[in-house]
Image (tube, rainbow, N blue to C red):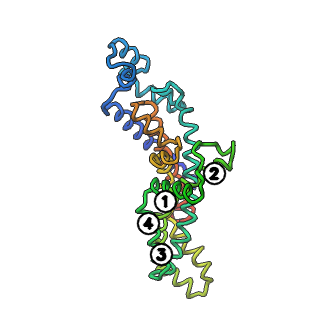
Amino acid sequence: MGKYIVKRVLLMIPTLLGVAVIIFFLMRIVPGDIVELRFAGESAYAQKENLDKERARLGLDKPIWHQFLSWMGGIVRLDFGTSMWTGAPITEEIRLRFVLSLQLAIMATIVAVALAIPLGVIAALRQDTWVDYAVRILSIAGLAMPSFWLGIVFILGLLIVFKWLPPMVYTPFWTDPVQNLAQLIWPALAVGYRYSAVATRMTRSAMLEVLREDYIRTARAKGLWEKLILSRHALKNAMLPVLTVIALEFAFLIGGLVVTEQVFNLNGLGMLFVESVAHRDYTLTQALVMLVAFSFIFVNFLVDLAYAWLDPRIRFR
């Protein structure tokens, strides 16, 4: 097991390096200049001397290979530098928003798992009955409805029916847990329902496939308790593809909820991503891409470990 973990950790390094190379040079290829964009807000014309001074201050006058090596050296030291647009440390820019996005992703994942696994298992056990049809309709509706639209419906429903509007100013959990949950529970429900629709269908399909296996028939023929068969044999083996879907969706939620964050007035990583790209903030955009890439890679690493725990054949291969 130790060799397996070391191997998976070492595989992270070339992946992150590849992402760093792609995002660095891609940001230089995309049209737009942060220096010209900054001065365009002050006047219609800026002198070339001022533009050159600003590029020198930001380090954009150096050869591109020098900029890349300098940036990579900072990443190794966990120093992402400062934002080219605001001048604030990137670590501080990301820290507050990352906490919000991470909490929302965790809450949405809890909602999704609480809905998806029981519904998927029930639908598989009651295949082609009204229960199965109801679960399938519910999951298809979740796939068809965007989470931001469902969030708008939640807000309008609370306002019209209960004459109450969720808090629109973010409060950290450690400051006021009640105020924090009163705001984030609604986007978590909206996103979690959309998230659970995919996981429900995957759980149902995986359970149907596993329940037809010979070892399930053998366990039933031996007279094992049905709940024991489902929990120890069927569900555990069906969780492999479901775990993959849940993990990938969780990693996506950390930086991919741009519109939903706007609906609920949440200044998370998604909003910061849009602002950094709009301002051509090279350093901040690169740091955000690396953060999201690391999130996907780390979550996949945890999924690989879970695979090895669920399936001993992976652990001993």
> Quick one: 166 or 226, which is closer to the camera?
166
Residue 315 visible somewhere in the drawing: no
Amino acid on which disc 3 is placed: Ala
Residue 23 visible somewhere in the drawing: yes
To which quarter of the image does residue 174 belong? Answer: top right
User: Which residue lies under the disc numbered 1?
Assistant: 195
Density class for disc 2 (Cα within 10 Å; few <14, some 14-19, many ≥20) is some
Q: CA distance from mark 2 to mark 1?
A: 19 Å
Helix, strand or loop for disc 3: helix
User: Which residue lies under the disc numbered 3?
Assistant: 134
Q: Quadrant of the N terminus?
A: bottom right
Q: Residue at x 66, y 45 (%)?
A: 173
Amino acid on which disc 4 is placed: Ala
User: Which residue lies under the disc numbered 2?
Assistant: 181
Nearest to N terminus: mark 2 or mark 3: 3
Q: Are marks 3 and 1 in contact (CB under 8 Å)?
A: no
Q: Position of residue 57 (x, y in %)?
A: 44, 17
Density class for disc 3 (Cα within 10 Å; few <14, some 14-19, many ≥20) is few
Q: Residue at x 52, y 80 (%)?
A: 216
Q: CA distance from mark 2 to mark 3?
A: 30 Å
Amino acid on which disc 1 is placed: Tyr
| Residue 141 disc label | 4
Q: CA distance from mark 2 to mark 4?
A: 26 Å
Q: Residue at x 50, y 54 (%)?
A: 151
Helix, strand or loop for disc 1: helix
Q: CA distance from mark 4 to mark 1?
A: 12 Å
Q: Position of residue 143 (x, y in %)?
A: 42, 63
Helix, strand or loop for disc 2: helix
Density class for disc 1 (Cα within 10 Å; few <14, some 14-19, many ≥20) is many
Density class for disc 4 (Cα within 10 Å; few <14, some 14-19, many ≥20) is some
